[in-house]
Image (spheres, rainbow, N blue to C red):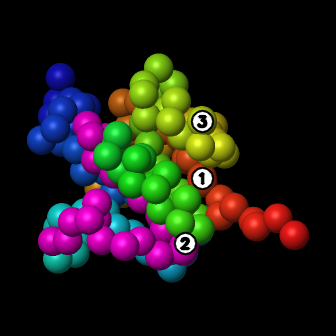
């Protein structure tokens, strides 16, 4: 099996497809950019802004999901591009937090990969909560 298809921590950076990053979430803050595209920052310790888009490392989504839920409780809208796996703890946390899930019709073609992802993806959106009148 080619390295391109192998899913492991060393192959954890998938560049967000342009139709998502520059179509749906254009100009949204990205606390988790590709290491090769931005200076190092720890997106888990900095304050996020409204609106934030995150394509976290697929091997470690839980801390990013927990941070997204925390930032959403502070009144921010957060979207996450994740591996679709409804059997995980982080998926359950998103569901409990009231996330909306968007499922692409097919496997994504990431900008820095030659073939489609070896897994299905999902976009989870935590919308800013409106204060009751």
Q: Secondary structure at mark 2?
A: loop
Q: Nearer the viewer, residue 13 or 94?
A: 94
Q: Is residue 71 above or below residue 57?
A: below
What residue occupies the far left of the structure in this picture? 10
First-in-chain label (1 vs 3): 3
Looking at the picture, does residue 28 appear above or below residue 95?
below
User: Which quadrant of the view contains residue 94?
Assistant: top right
Foreground of the two, 124 or 17: 124
Query: Which mark is on residue 95?
Result: 3
Q: Which callout, 3 or 2, points at the residue further toward the start of the chain?
A: 2
Asked if one can make out residue 76 in the rendered structure from this viewpoint, the answer is yes
Residue 129, how many percent across, how many down? 69, 61
Residue extending furthest toward the front: 133
- Range of residues picked out in magenta: 40-60
- Between residue 105 and residue 90, name the one nearer to us: 90
Image quarter (top left, top right, bottom left or bottom right) of the C terminus: bottom right
Residue 122: percent from the left, percent from the top? 53, 40
What whole-number distance in Å separates the C-alpha atoms at marks 3 and 2?
20 Å
Instruction: Please indicate whether residue 128 sits to the left or right of residue 3 in the image.
Output: right
Query: Which residue is tagged 1?
Result: 125
Which residue is nearer to you in this view: 113 or 103?
Answer: 103
Q: Which mark is residue 51?
A: 2
Q: Give the answer, above or below, for where 62 lies relative to 50.
A: above
Q: Which residue shows up at 42% across the image and 59% down it?
A: 54
Q: Residue at x 48, y 68 (%)?
A: 52
Q: Is residue 65 left or right of residue 40?
A: right
Disc 1: CA contacts within 10 A as few (<14), some (14-19) or many (>=20): many
Determine which of the numbered discs, if any, sits on residue 50 in the image. none
Residue 92: x and y in percent read: 52, 30
Q: Secondary structure at mark 1?
A: strand
């Amino acid at each position: 099996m080619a390295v391109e298809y192998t899913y492991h921590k060393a192959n954890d950076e998938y560049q967000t497809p342009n139709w998502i990053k520059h179509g749906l979430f254009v100009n949204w803050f990205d606390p988790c950019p590709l290491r090769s595209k931005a200076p190092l920052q720890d997106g888990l310790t900095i304050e996020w802004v409204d609106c934030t888009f995150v394509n976290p490392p697929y091997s470690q989504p839980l801390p990013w999901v927990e941070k997204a839920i925390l930032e959403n409780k502070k009144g921010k809208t957060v979207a996450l591009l994740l591996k679709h796996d409804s059997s995980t703890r982080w998926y359950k946390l998103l569901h409990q937090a009231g996330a909306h899930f968007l499922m692409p019709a097919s496997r994504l073609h990431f900008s820095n990969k030659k073939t489609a992802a070896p897994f299905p993806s999902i976009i989870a959106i935590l919308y800013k909560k409106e204060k009751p009148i």
